[in-house]
Amino acid sequence: MSKKLEGNGLFESSRMMLPEHKEAYLHHQERIVKKTRPKLDSQELEYLSAIIAQSMQEHTSVVLTLFDEVEDRHIAGTVIQIDPQRRAIRIQQEEEKLWIPAADIVRVSIQ
């Protein structure tokens, strides 16, 4: 048999990368750089708590920015429940209700 089919098979003999492929691969790798979770100080935590409580009491919409290692997520809705034991917040979107872990919340803004 030929050497192409030994070891790593056909892939071994076809290791070629076009410049466009290399550029796209590097761009992709830059985009998926994992971030670290930000540390919020006590003033920021107090501010987040106040806006969340205000949303629950006054039924106002808020936008929660949630931490993700690749890209932050944004969820809009009204806070309907705060569970201190679960350390989670329940938010009402248009037709669905979501539990959001409080540790994932990075930023809150009034909509």
Image (tube, grey):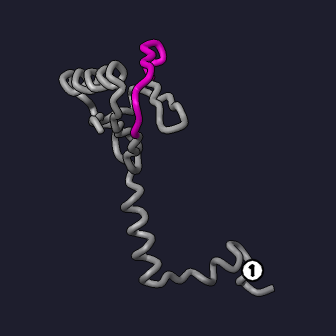
Q: Residues within 10 Å of mark 1 (few under 14, many from 20)?
A: few
What residue sits 44% from the left and 23% below the top?
A: 80
Q: Main secondary structure of the magenta part?
A: strand
What residue sits 26% from the left and 21% below the top?
A: 50
Q: Nearer the viewer, residue 95 or 91?
A: 95
What residue sits 49% from the left and 38% below the top?
A: 94
* Residue furthest to the bottom: 2
Look at the image and give the residue range highlighted in magenta.
Answer: 76-88
Residue 41 sits in quarter: top left
What residue sits 75% from the left and 80% below the top?
A: 5
Residue 97 sits above or below residue 75 on the image: above
Label 1 sits on a secondary structure element that is helix
Please give the residue where the numbered disc 1 appears in the rendered image: 5
Coordinates of residue 49 in the picture (x, y in percent): 29, 22
**Residue type pointed to by label 1:** Leu
Residue 37 sits in quarter: top left
